[in-house]
């Protein structure tokens, strides 16, 4: 029976290879950190979501070991049958405290949290208004609901509609979408956005979004996966960075990036919404409870970040330094504050091949970075996306910047 599909897939996979779109995975033979081992060689990692350097932090590892000893390896149950331990409630409490919300519900991943959050809240009489560059999991979550949807041009707050030359489509600003949803008499409206967008590292204008939400009687949902733990003065996230803590109705975030880097995510926000999720969210009701080791280490992580801003401060210093020295060296860098630092190749000839060649040469120099091309980013927006970490010391940054300059000169980019 499989024959026809086998042939089809073999052809499709070949075609991906030919288009240089096949995803080959590099194999890492060490723990995650600033220094990793690839092909038996020690290299510096500049492309992990390990923003705070906690992925292999000794205190988190110790907390995970201890929690395995005290609460076991797994729960073999969903939360509402026999999968809720005291530590799950403790983590939910600590996440709420950290984010400044009323309550929190845990999921196996932020992908699940985003997949869960829309369907129980928004039906055909409601409106979901979503940024064009939102994460795949938000897009999928919205697809699972029966709500009406409006997509607004990335980051565009205005009451406008304009023709996009590239796609030939009409693009609307957020305020225009809100007006249209009001005219249709929608019952509930929600604006959904990433807090930080992962490809450019640009930061949602949550202050303006909250103002518009108030004006048009909408809720605000923010995905904080690339922000929780380090954005804002005390690392609470984009809502702190933009001065709108307490004004966000729904936050989703991950424990798989800055907050330890293993697995897990949550929805955090208004009390009734979280209680509704405990009763209705399908990835919560029908999927296993988070493992004790992860729960224990994530609790430890939040304790560390609540006690001191040292790690996010170091990340901020590292980010400023890297961005400044790379820009001064002549690289084309999208300006900003976020540790995601995209080095753009669009202005050079054969930019896709050049970015791949650049990343390969960087690995030979002992720096692990990855080139991003279509369809992950739009055509002509090829880039190497560097991610700075608090795990990087000055010597790591010295070496990376020197390697970028060396390869940049070899390839006649600077
Ligand atoms: C990484 C990411 C997710 C998925 O997080 P997981 O916990 O790994 O499932 C969701 N949303 C955004 C914006 C992300 O960057």
Image (cartoon, rainbow, N blue to C red):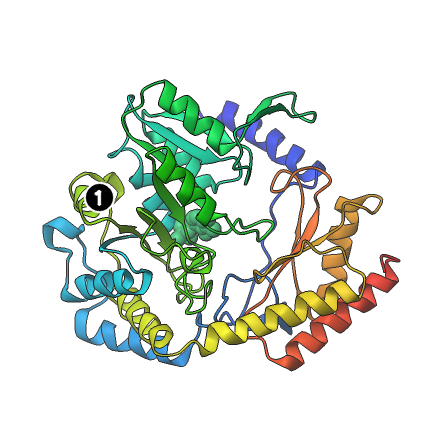
Label 1 environment density (alpha carbons within 10 Å; few <14, some 14–19, many ≥20)? many
- Where's residue 110, x and y in %? 37, 50
* Tag 1 secondary structure: helix
In this view, the residue in front, 389 or 203, is: 203
Q: Quadrant of the rendered structure where residue 357 is?
A: bottom right
In this view, the residue in front, 297 or 135, is: 135
Taking 85 as reference, is 411 left or right? right
In this view, the residue in front, 385 or 210, is: 210
* Residue farthest toward the left in the current orientation of the protein: 81
Q: Which residue is drawn at the image coordinates 55% and 31% (left, top)? A: 9
Q: Which residue is drawn at the image coordinates 41% and 55% (left, top)? A: 239
Q: Quadrant of the rendered structure where residue 286 is?
A: top left
* Residue farthest toward the top in the current orientation of the protein: 184
Is residue 141 among what the camera can see? no
Above or below, 14 relative to 314: above
- Where's residue 366, x and y in %? 70, 71
Q: Which residue is drawn at the image coordinates 78% and 66% (left, top)? A: 328
Q: Quadrant of the N terminus?
A: top left
In this view, the residue in front, 317 or 31, is: 317
- Where's residue 83, x and y in %? 15, 56
Above or below, 144 relative to 296: above
Q: Quadrant of the C terminus?
A: bottom right
Q: Which residue is drawn at the image coordinates 47% and 62% (left, top)? A: 231
Q: Which residue is mark 1?
A: 273
Is residue 30 among what the camera can see? yes
């Amino acid at each position: 029976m499989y024959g026809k599909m086998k042939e089809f897939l073999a052809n499709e996979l070949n075609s991906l290879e030919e288009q240089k779109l096949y995803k080959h995975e590099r194999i890492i033979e060490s723990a995650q950190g600033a220094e990793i081992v690839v092909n038996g060689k020690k290299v510096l990692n500049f492309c992990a979501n390990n923003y705070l350097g906690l992925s292999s932090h000794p205190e988190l590892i110790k907390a995970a070991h201890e929690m395995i000893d005290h609460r076991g390896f797994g729960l073999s149950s969903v939360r509402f049958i026999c999968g809720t331990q005291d530590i799950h409630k403790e983590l939910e409490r600590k996440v709420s405290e950290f984010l400044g919300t009323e309550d929190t519900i845990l999921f196996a991943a932020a992908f699940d949290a985003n997949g869960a959050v829309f369907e129980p809240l928004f039906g055909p009489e409601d409106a979901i208004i979503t940024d064009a560059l939102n994460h795949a999991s938000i897009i999928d979550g919205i697809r699972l609901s029966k709500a009406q949807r409006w997509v607004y041009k990335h980051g565009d707050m205005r009451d406008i509609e304009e023709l996009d030359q590239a796609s030939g489509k009409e693009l609307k600003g957020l305020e225009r979408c809100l007006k249209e949803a009001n005219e249709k008499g929608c019952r509930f409206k929600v604006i959904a956005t990433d807090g930080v967008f992962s490809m450019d590292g640009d930061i949602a204008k949550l202050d303006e979004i909250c103002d518009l939400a108030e004006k048009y009687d909408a809720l605000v949902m923010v995905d904080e996966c690339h922000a929780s733990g380090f954005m804002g003065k005390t690392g609470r996230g984009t809502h702190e960075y933009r001065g709108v803590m307490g004004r966000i109705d729904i936050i989703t975030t991950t424990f798989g990036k800055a907050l330890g880097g293993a697995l897990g995510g949550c929805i955090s926000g208004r009390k009734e919404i979280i209680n509704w999720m405990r009763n209705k969210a399908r990835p919560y009701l029908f999927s296993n409870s988070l493992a004790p080791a992860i729960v224990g280490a994530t609790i430890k992580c939040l304790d560390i970040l609540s006690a001191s801003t040292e790690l996010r401060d170091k990340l901020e210093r590292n980010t400023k330094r890297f961005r400044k020295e790379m820009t001064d060296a002549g690289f084309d860098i999208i300006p900003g504050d976020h540790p995601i630092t995209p080095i753009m190749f669009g202005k050079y000839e054969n930019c896709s091949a050049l970015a791949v060649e650049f990343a390969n040469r960087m690995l030979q120099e002992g720096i692990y970075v990855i080139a991003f091309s279509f369809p992950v980013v739009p055509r002509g927006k090829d880039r190497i996306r560097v991610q700075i970490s608090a795990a990087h010391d000055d010597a790591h940054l010295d070496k990376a910047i020197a390697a970028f300059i060396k390869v940049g000169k070899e390839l006649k980019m600077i």
